């Protein structure tokens, strides 16, 4: 099957390029899973509305897993680990109540994460979804690149859609987003907080951390609902050392894990064959040439480190561990172990699959799915890829894994309405979150049997050419979706392998302590520019175009231009939520 990423275009401008790289979904060709969790999130000063630790306010819904879902092939009692399925279960009807809608019109502001779907008028699958919803759902679907102009226009208007998709979440939304949400959007606290969510069992099955880390709560009230995703990291703030199994295992040993930083340098030296145009490792400048994996190796913070007792918040690049990781990567490149085209390339993954280098720092989940699938379908002989287990630069130190918030960075709100209307829309949202393996889920993601998909001998839906635009490209799953599952049946042993890896990464995981909060400066022009200036300069140091002695001065400039204000805003929000 083709890669789901092959269908995705540019979603947004350069100011959020790293975030888009982490969140970009792949096209829905083989499974219902979608985009990885977004990277870090954060929080606005109290005067602007503070998405904060919702536990204090009691606004979070109770977590009540469904007991009627098909038994997964791979399951952990830890709700932070995704269930895995080797094959699609035999579909069952999960919604046995009256249809959720009342026959009303439901207008939606949505984003085109895929190519345009078949228009509603010519789309029998969309009509069938509406029939089962008993609602006339109509979507205005915009390109992500148009959102910076479209969404402010929507906010300023008097005729709001019923449901609004906030592209890339409130951390990257237009100025005034929290004020807009508080004044114009429905307060869902009475309907979803605590055990009230039992009226919407599919929403209750979404783990608590996805609601909390997606900034669903603002000033103690619940306004948003999350799109649940896996926790292990991806760019720009996470990633792991992946290897080409065929080459690495033969040269170094099957799934061999480096003992420490010196051992990794030895491995790079053994893998490096520039005379054959094959290098040990290759990454591009977008995420500082794979720096996040080296930060994990040296034990640097996952974006921020919080000392609660001292009331101290430290950004990762203010630590000695960060500086040591930069110096280490600088040495790797100076030694000639990095793919030499890395500084000018925008696509390391295709070259990883093509065998230009043996190792690469890549993200868990859809990133891995992408080059796993490419390795089986685009090259001959096929290549296989797996991540190394986490390890540390100093032998004996506890390995760590950077985690994402576990809630997709985009979110959804609904406009203010009467209680009856809010309940109707919540029933529709609940229906759209029907469990994996249900007939409703099959319809939403694959469409109508024998028209949009056919079943393979194991019962897995295989989309027809018409099926993708009629079902998979309609962005239902970005309005609401069941908890994420690991399911890619065209990849041999995918669910088992990814489940084992995810368990390990989650067990060693550390989370950015600011994900429940929002810093206005972090995502305004001063914060974005200060981060970009520092990141560009770090790339220059990594490439030995600037001396390491510049590092402390660059960090000091970041502090004075935006960093100290960002820190203050986070600390104010954390204190307010204590």
Image (spheres, helix red, strand yellow):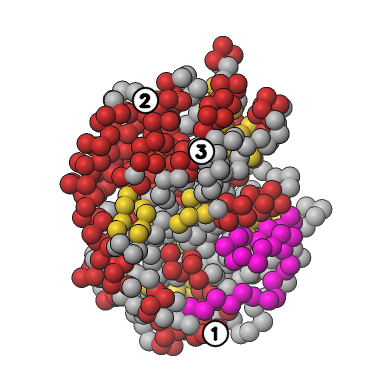
Q: Residues within 10 Å of mark 1 (few under 14, many from 20)?
A: some
2 and 3 marks in contact (CB < 8 Å): no
Q: CA distance from mark 2 to mark 1?
A: 56 Å
Q: Which residue is mark 1?
A: 199
The numbered mark, 2 or 1, whose residue comes first in the sequence reads 1
Q: Can I make out residue 449 in this image? A: no
Residue 486 is left or right of residue 524, and the answer is: right
The numbered mark, 3 or 1, whose residue comes first in the sequence reads 1
Residue 194 image point, x, y percent: 48, 82
Magenta stretch prevailing secondary structure: loop
- As for residue 447 lying within the magenta part, the answer is no
Q: Residues within 10 Å of mark 2 (few under 14, many from 20)?
A: many
Query: Which labelled disc corresponds to residue 394?
Result: 3
| Image position of 41 with respect to 326: above or below | below
Q: Residue furthest left?
A: 560
Q: CA distance from mark 2 to mark 3?
A: 24 Å
> SS for tag 2?
loop
Q: Nearer the viewer, mark 2 or mark 3?
A: 3
Residue 362 image point, x, y percent: 52, 40
Observer-nearest residue: 367 or 391? 391
Q: Residues within 10 Å of mark 3 (few under 14, many from 20)?
A: some
Magenta residues, as a range? 61-87
- The quadrant holding residue 206 is bottom right
Residue visible at 78% across and 52% down?
A: 456
| Image position of 226 with respect to 339: above or below | below
Q: CA distance from mark 3 to mark 1?
A: 51 Å
């Amino acid at each position: 099957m083709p890669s789901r990423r092959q269908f995705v275009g540019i979603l947004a401008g350069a100011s959020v390029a790293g975030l888009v790289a982490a969140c970009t979904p792949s096209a829905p060709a083989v499974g219902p899973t979608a985009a990885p969790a977004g990277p870090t999130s954060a929080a606005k000063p109290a005067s602007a509305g503070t998405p904060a630790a919702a536990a204090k306010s009691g606004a979070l819904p109770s977590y009540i897993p469904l007991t009627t879902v098909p038994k997964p092939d791979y399951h952990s009692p830890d709700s932070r680990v995704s269930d895995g399925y080797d094959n699609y279960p035999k579909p069952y009807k999960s919604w046995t109540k009256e249809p959720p809608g009342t026959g009303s019109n439901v207008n939606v502001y949505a984003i085109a994460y895929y190519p345009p779907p078949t228009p509603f008028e010519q789309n029998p699958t969309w009509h069938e979804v509406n029939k089962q919803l008993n609602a006339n759902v109509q979507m205005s679907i915009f390109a992500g690149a148009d959102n910076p102009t479209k969404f402010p226009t929507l906010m300023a208007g008097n005729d709001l859609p019923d449901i609004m998709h906030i592209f890339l979440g409130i951390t990257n939304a237009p100025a005034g987003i929290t004020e807009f949400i508080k004044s114009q959007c429905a307060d869902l606290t009475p309907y979803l907080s605590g055990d009230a969510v039992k009226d919407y069992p599919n929403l209750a099955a979404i783990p608590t951390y996805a609601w909390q880390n997606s900034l669903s709560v603002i000033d103690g009230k619940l306004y948003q609902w999350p799109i649940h995703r896996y926790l292990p990291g991806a760019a720009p703030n996470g990633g792991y050392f992946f290897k080409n199994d065929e080459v690495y295992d033969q040269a170094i040993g099957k799934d061999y894990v480096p003992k420490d930083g010196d051992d990794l340098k030895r491995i790079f030296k053994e893998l490096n064959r520039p005379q054959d145009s094959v290098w040990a490792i290759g990454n591009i400048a977008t995420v500082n040439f794979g720096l996040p994996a080296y930060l994990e190796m040296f034990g640097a913070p996952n974006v921020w480190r919080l000392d609660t007792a001292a009331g101290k918040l430290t950004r990762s690049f203010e630590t000695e561990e960060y500086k040591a990781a930069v110096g280490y990567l600088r040495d790797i490149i100076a030694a000639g172990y990095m793919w030499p085209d890395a500084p000018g390339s925008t696509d390391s993954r295709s070259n990883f699959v093509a065998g230009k280098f043996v190792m690469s720092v890549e993200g868990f989940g859809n990133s891995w799915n992408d080059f796993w699938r490419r390795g089986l379908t685009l090259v001959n002989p096929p290549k296989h890829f797996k991540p190394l287990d986490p390890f540390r630069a100093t032998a004996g130190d506890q390995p760590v894994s950077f985690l994402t918030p576990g809630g997709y960075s985009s979110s959804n709100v609904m406009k203010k309405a009467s209680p009856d209307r809010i309940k109707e829309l919540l029933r529709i949202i609940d229906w759209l979150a029907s469990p994996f393996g249900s007939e409703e889920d099959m319809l939403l993601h694959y469409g109508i049997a024998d028209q949009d998909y056919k079943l393979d001998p194991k019962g897995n839906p295989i989309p027809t050419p018409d099926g993708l635009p009629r079902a998979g490209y309609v962005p239902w799953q970005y309005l609401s979706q069941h908890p994420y599952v690991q399911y890619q049946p065209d990849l041999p042993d995918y669910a088992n392998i990814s489940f084992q890896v995810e368990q390990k990464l989650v067990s060693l995981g550390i989370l950015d302590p600011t994900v429940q909060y929002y810093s206005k400066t972090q995502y305004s022009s001063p914060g974005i520019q200060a981060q970009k200036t520092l990141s560009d300069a770090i790339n220059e140091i990594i490439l030995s175009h600037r001396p390491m002695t510049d590092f402390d001065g660059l960090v000091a400039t970041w502090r004075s231009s935006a960093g100290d204000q960002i820190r203050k805003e986070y600390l104010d929000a954390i204190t307010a939520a204590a």
